[in-house]
């Protein structure tokens, strides 16, 4: 019996373009000394080979017409059809392979005695053009590190280690200029400066995109006049941040009774992959903010962004966008609502039993970007160690 253990050094979440490091251990555990049927000689276990590979699987629903004829990995899927004699990392999984790294052989003919352990470090750089991990209504992208090993004259055993990949839009363009310093003439009298890694460039790109700039003001109106003035301090946010804004009802000509704000995603299938021409985007709601603003002059919006959602991205199959969905409940027409006043006798003010109301809807696009992978790993407490017994 051999135990195969895989542990992700930096956690299960990575940015596209970052190096994945996986510590893989093969061990022959000690046999219990209480068993009588045991010889004095060491018991050896043999493995013929072991190989590691990262692949991204794409599965679609009936709403998507997958362009299988244009798949760049169609030849690979055909070549790995015989799963009995070849290493097929996508064996038993539904969908299509959209990204696959070159397999790396860890060893050939490994022999372990009782209690012996062999460890290997697997390192692979995720391509910058890789799609992000995503579980949508019509399209799903999932990443796995697949470790395949085999005994002589036995079936291939697979250990799959799931990954979550985040994509920074604009990072691929920034990384193209990373070697510009190498073209400059060298000066032997200057100290060697630290060269920025692709991860440093990606984090810097995130900071630039989500930096707080000038606030944006929006006048919310309907047919009766001005409802509110909404202020949003920035348009781009990272995972785990709070969307902060303010509502100003002091100059409103239409009384607002309550306001509802919902964080929503829009999943739109590419025009060439739609089953029907008039196929509407799939809208999914997440966190929401609700405030009864009857007789209020000012109030604030605090809406947290979950860590498990997928930031905005676009591929040949699908486009994901984010928006704030507003629902303002206003008094019908220009009806003036009674204002609560303090009572000297200590009586509690009672609101009106019935109101003539109208509801208006407004959608404000925003941009959600990734964050540092370590923050997502710690926030979700994701598993990073897996084991299989052969």
Image (cartoon, rainbow, N blue to C red):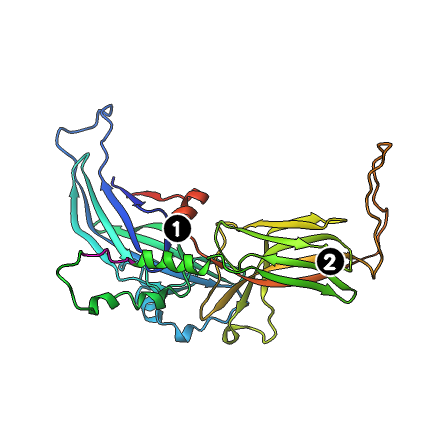
Observer-nearest residue: 307 or 107? 307
Q: Main secondary structure of the magenta part?
A: loop
Q: Position of residue 273 (x, y in %)?
A: 50, 73
Depth check, mark 1 against mark 2: the one in front is 2
Q: Position of residue 299 (x, y in %)?
A: 67, 49
Q: Quadrant of the N terminus?
A: top left
Q: Residue at x 50, y 59 (%)?
A: 213
Please give left or right for residue 129 compared with residue 321 in the image: left
Q: Residues within 10 Å of mark 2 (few under 14, many from 20)?
A: few
Q: Which residue is label 2 attached to?
A: 251
Q: Quadrant of the C terminus?
A: top left
Checking the image for residue 373, the label placed there is 1
Q: Residue at x 60, y 53 (%)?
A: 245
Query: Is there a contact, CB below 8 Å, between mark 1 and mark 2?
Result: no
Specify start and end residues of the magenta stretch as a single range. Answer: 192-197
Please give left or right for residue 65 compared with residue 350 in the image: left
Q: Position of residue 348 (x, y in %)?
A: 83, 36
């Amino acid at each position: 019996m051999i135990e195969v253990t895989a542990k992700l050094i930096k956690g299960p979440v990575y940015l596209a373009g970052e190096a994945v490091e996986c510590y893989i251990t093969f061990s022959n555990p000690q046999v219990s000394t209480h068993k009588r049927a045991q010889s004095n000689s060491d018991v050896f276990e043999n493995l013929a080979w072991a190989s590691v590979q990262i692949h991204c699987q794409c599965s679609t629903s009936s709403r998507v017409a997958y362009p299988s004829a244009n798949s760049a990995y169609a030849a690979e899927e055909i070549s790995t059809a015989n799963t009995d004699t070849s290493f097929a990392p996508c064996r038993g999984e539904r969908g299509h392979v959209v990204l696959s790294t070159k397999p790396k052989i860890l060893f050939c003919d490994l022999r372990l005695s009782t209690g012996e352990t062999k460890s290997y470090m697997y390192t692979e750089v995720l391509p910058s053009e890789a799609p992000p991990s995503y579980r949508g209504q019509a399209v799903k992208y999932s990443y796995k590190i697949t470790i395949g090993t085999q005994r002589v004259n036995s079936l291939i055993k697979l250990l799959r280690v799931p990954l979550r990949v985040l994509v920074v839009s604009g990072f691929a363009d920034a990384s193209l200029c990373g070697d510009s310093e190498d073209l400059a003439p060298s000066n032997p009298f200057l100290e060697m400066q630290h060269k920025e890694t692709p991860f440093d460039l990606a984090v810097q790109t995130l900071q630039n995109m989500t930096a707080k700039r000038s606030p944006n003001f929006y006048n919310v109106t309907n047919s009766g006049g001005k409802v509110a003035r909404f202020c949003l301090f920035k348009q781009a946010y990272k995972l785990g941040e709070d969307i902060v804004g303010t509502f100003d009802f002091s100059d409103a000509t239409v009384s607002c009774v309550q306001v509802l704000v919902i964080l929503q995603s829009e999943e739109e299938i590419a025009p060439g992959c739609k089953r029907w021409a008039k196929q509407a985007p799939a809208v999914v709601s997440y966190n929401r903010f609700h405030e009864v603003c009857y007789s209020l002059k000012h109030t604030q919006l605090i809406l947290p962004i979950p860590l498990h959602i997928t930031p905005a991205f676009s591929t040949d199959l699908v486009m994901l966008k984010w928006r704030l969905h507003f629902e303002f409940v206003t008094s019908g027409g220009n009806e003036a609502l009674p204002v609560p006043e303090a009572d000297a006798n200590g009586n509690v003010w009672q609101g009106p039993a019935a109101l003539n109301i109208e509801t208006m809807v407004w959608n404000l696009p925003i941009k959600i970007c990734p964050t540092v992978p370590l923050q997502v790993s710690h926030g979700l407490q994701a598993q990073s160690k897996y084991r299989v017994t052969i």
